[in-house]
Every structure is written in structure tokens, then in C-alpha cells.
Image (cartoon, rainbow, N blue to C red):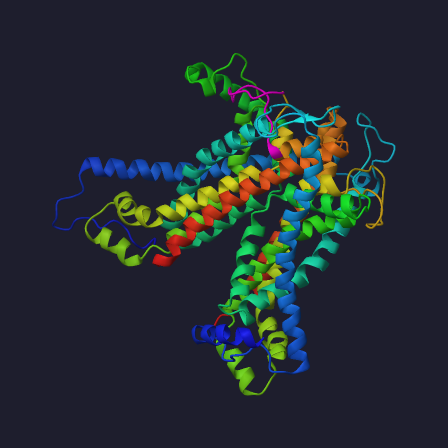
Amino acid sequence: MSSETGVEAAAATRRRTPSLRMSTGRAGDKIFVSAARGSGLTVLAIMAAIAVFLVWKAIPALQDNKANFLTAEEWNPNAVPPRFGIAQLAFGTIVSSLLAMLIATPVAVGIALFISFYSSRKLASVLGYVVDLLAAVPSIVYGLWGLIFLSKHMEGISKFLNSVLGWIPLFGGDSPGKNSIFTAGVVLAIMILPIISSITREVFLQVPRANVEAALALGATRWEMIRLSVLPYGRSGMIGASMLGLGRAMGETIAVAMVLTFVPGINVHILENGGSTFASNIANSFSEASETGRGALIASGLVLFVITLLVNMAARAVVARRKEFV
Amino acid sequence: MTSLTTPKGAGLSSVSTGRKIKDKLVQGFVYLAFVLALVPLLSVLWTVVSNGVARLDPTFFQFSMNGVSGKDPGGGAYHAIIGTLEQVLICSVIAVPIAVLTAIYLVEYAGNGRLGKVVSFFVDVMTGIPSIVAGLFVLALWLLTFGFEFSGFAGALALTILMIPTVVRATEEMLKLVPNDLREASYALGVPRWRTVCFVILPTAMTGIVTGIMLAVARVMGETAPLLLTIFFTKAINTDPFSGPQGSLPTFIWEQAADPNQNSIDRAWTGALVLIAIIMLLNLAARLVARRSAPVSR
């Protein structure tokens, strides 16, 4: 405790709490401080345990693996000898979530602009609540909706895109279907819309009012005001928000698992049926997995964990950089 | 922001046509974006309600799927509803104290200390953990290392990991809103610090914290992925969350939707309707609690 007093005292000058020390020496204080600090440490312990146990349980399966874990496209951890790699999963995860981010970001920014600058204050709170409702719908419901309702309608859109943009390899292929990475990307886009728009809205709220009023006073139209004062100010916030959405999309499991039909191998034609992501593969193959199979799934989950961690940390760094200027 | 309308040039030359058109185009895009967001929401709600009412009968709430195959009519989600309620209850009992105490530590005790910063950073990291990874962790720790069997409790543990960061953040926000005058007044009266936290600060922030907890409960209730790996599947009623596979509403929907028979699909829709109804009610109740008394309005 004594070693921390210096830090505490320095901290207390900037803090609102008047007391310099954590505990007054009373038994009740001591117990309460230890409980609070213990809970904080529990959070750290959980995070450490997640990393340790995932690595520990993944290693035996990785040692038995007869294929290259990073480059192999097949996923046969239950075979003898086990052969599995994450190439296809990584491809599906990255393409579907990037697609989701590209679709969701403009719409989310549009919503944030609408709520912040185009609607009346009373309407704004109602609309904010409506967008929050999108976030409250569980992913299994989006999955069911995507599988049974949306995919029917996506077939026509996919065929249209294929006929118009078929010369781009991504939209090429002979048989555009409904259970494709493209459909998964659209479902993911809907799911990450609320988080992107709510963070973007927070950033827009911080735009200095003086800048907004100055732009308007100079005779700017509403769009010019947004372009001159809001967008430059909110740029890093919007980038950070869409990256957080990307991280969310990468880890999304059930909706993707329900929408995609598994076809082995990487297929760059995202309008055709098939594809698989880290998370959907875990959900789909867990119930038939042997011991090595479970280890292999844990290994792929570890890769997903690391990727989402990196994306989220980068996103938070981008959002936080903006805060320092405020 | 809304009061700021584009000033019409009084005496000045009016806005040129090109700029006007651009302004209107952007306005059109912004309105369109909002409509685009409403379409899926309304579509999801409409399909769930219209398809879900078909099987919204007493049987659905009174029977399990025991002995009912995919193509049979009848059967229900009693086992799944029981399972979901038990798992979410256990999860809340574990997660809420840890999360609230962590938030108290961060706001009341940590100051700018290093431990506080580290904990705060890892709470952020925890927010971003994909739900399936939480499931894999409990699988690796509880089932593969400690050797326990699939159970509702294992599922609750996985949900706990997802619930803690949400509740920490919500509680933190509320504690920060408590005015410092209250703390100082309490200290001036010679009240010990822990009693100040427990009997002055927490009651002041209570409604906000309750709102946060209810929203977090609503969020974890819809989680499916971690449950697939921890509670596994069962068609029978299992009221004991500590032994053997248990049902849950999300996994019930997942299982029924995987079966191509129409009777199964109908059950999946009704399951989705019940799940959404519970979650929306929790959300609504949380808003009402929050509105009835805003945490601090001084």
C-alpha cells in the first residue's frame, strides 16, 4: 500500500475524491477495498486465463496436424491423420466482414447525420431508440430471418449484380446463389449498423458548436456546414467506429453460420453459395468434433481472438486520439 | 442543432442552384440511409411476429421436445425457457457483483493509478471478445481441463464473461454522474469511506445501475454461440443447471431451424418470437426505470 501512496497522491490532485488514501484503516474499509480491488483483478485474471487456456488446449491438436495450419484450405481435424488449415476460414471471415463494413458505414454515417443535424430534438431521441432496437435483436433471430426470409430475396439481387458486374472477379461466377458470402455480408452489415451509428453520433455531438455556427454564418448550406466543420472533425471517430464494427462482424457467429452453406475450398466469387468463417465453422462442426477436432476448433478460435483483439485495439486507439483534441 | 437553419440571404445574393442541388442530394441520401435502417428492423419484427403466432399456443409453453421429431406437430419450448431463465439468473448472480465492484474500484479508488488503467483497458478488450471465444474458453477450462460435463452452469459461466464488461461500463458511467458534493458531505460527517460508497453513492446511482444490468441481461439472453459449446443439446426438461446438457431458447431456435420440416421451422419462429418478446420487455422496463428517476439531476 505504501508504495502506491505517491501515485495516489499525485492522482488525487486531479481527482474529485478528497481523501488521499484508499482506506482509513477501519476494518470495513479494508474489506471493501480488497473486495473492489479483487474484482478488478478478477477481470485481469479472466483475460489472462482466456489466453492461457486457449493456447494450452490448442497446442496438442496443432502438433498432430499434418497440413499447414495457416495455408491449408481443408478442415478435416477428425480424420486420421488430422489435416486442417485456416486459409478458407480467414478468407471468409475477412471478406464477409469487410463487405459488411463497406455496406454499413455509409448508411450508419447517414443515420448519425440524420439524427444529429436533420431531425428535431424530440424526434432524435425516438430515432436513437429505434436504432438501439436494431442492436437488441439477438443474432439467432437475424440468422433465422436471413436464412428463411432474406436469402430468398438476395437471390435476385445476386443474379442482377452478377449480370451487371460479372466482369469483376469478385462478382463473377456461373451460379450466383442465395447462401453466399454476399448474403452473409448483408446480414452482418445490418447487425453492425447500430454500433457504428451510435459511436459516430457521439463523435458528432462533440463537434464544437462554434465551428458549426461559423460555417452557417458564412452562408454555408447545411451540407457545406457538414462538409466543412463536422466531417473533418469527426473523421477519425468515424474510422474508429467502422473498425469497431469490423471487429464485431468478424466475431459474429450464429447469423453467419445459419446463412452460409458450407462448400469446401476458397471461392473468390462471393455471389456463389459457400464459404465459411472462423466463428461459423466452430458453431457448425463442434457437435461432431473429436478430441483433436475440439483442439483444432480452439486453435482457430484463438486466431479469431487475436485478430479481433488487434482490430478492436486499433479502433479504440483511433477513437481515443480524437478525444485528446477535445 | 436543429435550430440552426440555413440563413436565407437577406440583402445578399441567394444560394446558387448548384449548391442548392448538392444540399438537397445529401439531404436525400441522409433520409434514405434512415429508411434503409428501418427496413430490416421492421422486416425482422414483422416476419418474426407473423410466422411466430402460428405456434404461439399453450402447448408451446407447457411441453418439451422430448419424443417429438422434426416433422411432428406439437412439442414446445418449456425445457428451453426453463434453461434460459436459470442460465441467465446464475450468470447475473456471478457477473453483477464482480462488475459493480470493479466499477466502484475504477471510479472511487483507482484514481489515475496504474492498476486502474490496466483494468480499464482490459474491460475494453473484454467488450470486444467474440461470444464464441467466450464459449471456447469455458470449454477449454471447465470441460476439458477440469473435466466437468456439459451443463447449464457452464453456459452461465460463458455468459458471465460477456456480461461483466457491459455492466462495468454502465455502472462506471452512473457512478461518475454522482455529484462530488455528496461524497464530501458524507466524509465531513465522519462517515467511513465504504459506508459512503454503499449507503450514499450506490443508492444515488441505483436506478442507472439497474437499467444497465437489465440491458446487459437482455443482451446475454440472446447469445447462442457460447451456449452451443457449453450446454450442448437436449430435447428433455432438465431443471438442474449443474448436471447434464440443458436447453435454452437460442439453441432451441438453432436446432429447430436446422430441420427442414415446416413444423420445426414454425417452432423456430415461435421460439424467436418468445425470445424477442422477453428481450424487448426487458429493454422497455429498463427504459422505464431509467425514466422514472434519472440518476442525478442536480
Quadrant of the rendered image containing residue B42: top right
Residue at 50% in and 39% down: A246
- Quadrant containing the N terminus of chain A is bottom right
| Residue A19 sits above or below residue B110 on the image | below
Residue at 59% in and 31% down: A277
Q: Is residue A217 visible?
A: yes
Percent position of residue B90, x then y? 75, 55
Q: Is residue A277 magenta?
A: yes
B133 on left or right of A14: right
Residue at the limit of the structure toward the top, as seen here: A174
| Residue A141 sits above or below residue A276 on the image | below
Majority SS type along the magenta span = loop
Percent position of residue B21, x then y? 25, 35
B39 on left or right of B150: left
Which is nearer the eye, B129 or A112?
B129
Percent position of residue A67, x then y? 64, 25
Percent position of residue A57, x then y? 70, 41
Number of on-image labels: 0
| Residue A101 sits above or below residue B206 on the image | above
Which is nearer the eye, B214 or A203?
A203
Q: Which residues are magenta?
A: A264-278
- Quadrant containing the C terminus of chain A is bottom left
Which is nearer the eye, B126 or B224?
B126
